[in-house]
Image (spheres, helix red, strand yellow):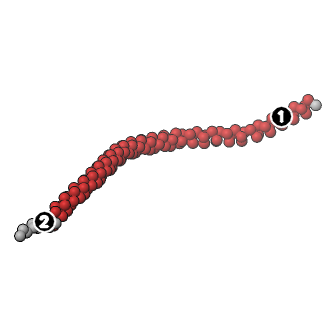
Amino acid sequence: MPTALEITLILVLAAIAVGLVPLLFQLRRTAQGLDAFLLSSRIHLGQIAEDVHASRMRMDELAGSLQTSMNELSTFAQAMGDVGRTVKDLHTRFSGSLDATSRNLGLILGGLSAVLAFFKCRQSTPAPEPESQP
């Protein structure tokens, strides 16, 4: 029986060897393909990294330009707000001044009217005629 065991063991080892040889060849081809892929990826990834870096630099430039524009717009908006407040204050002051002036003018005209009416009334009242003496 030891001979039958040896023959079985040899046959099993031969079957494993026959199965392993194509597997090892396939593994070798896969390793070569992976090596070629990694070499080409290194070249392409370098180009991709350069493109990403250039895009990031352009985005930084655009962000700086946008920030400058927003700062200028903010300054302009603040200036317009200050002008609006000043115009509103001047309008309020002028409106108050115009109301006071028209009120004062009305009072003066009313006073003049009363004085003129008084003088007119005095002039239109007939003076008493002197009585005649016989």
Q: Say which quadrant the C terminus sits in.
A: bottom left
Q: Is residue 111 left or right of residue 81?
A: left
Residue 103 seen from this side: yes
Q: Say which quadrant the N terminus sits in.
A: top right
Q: Earlier in the sequence, mark 2 or mark 1?
A: 1
Residue placed furthest toward the left: 134
Q: Nearer the viewer, residue 69 or 62?
A: 69
Q: Nearer the viewer, residue 29 or 101?
A: 101
SS type, badge 1: helix
Q: Residues within 10 Å of mark 2 (few under 14, many from 20)?
A: few
Residue 74 pos. (x, y %): 37, 45
Q: What mark, if any, has residue 10 been given in the picture? A: 1
Residue 124 pos. (x, y %): 15, 67
Q: Determine which residue is flagged by label 2.
A: 127
SS type, badge 2: loop
Report how far apart the C-alphas of labels 2 and 1 lie in the structure. 166 Å
Residue at the spot 64% in from the left edge and 41% down from the top edge? 30
Residue placed furthest toward the top: 2
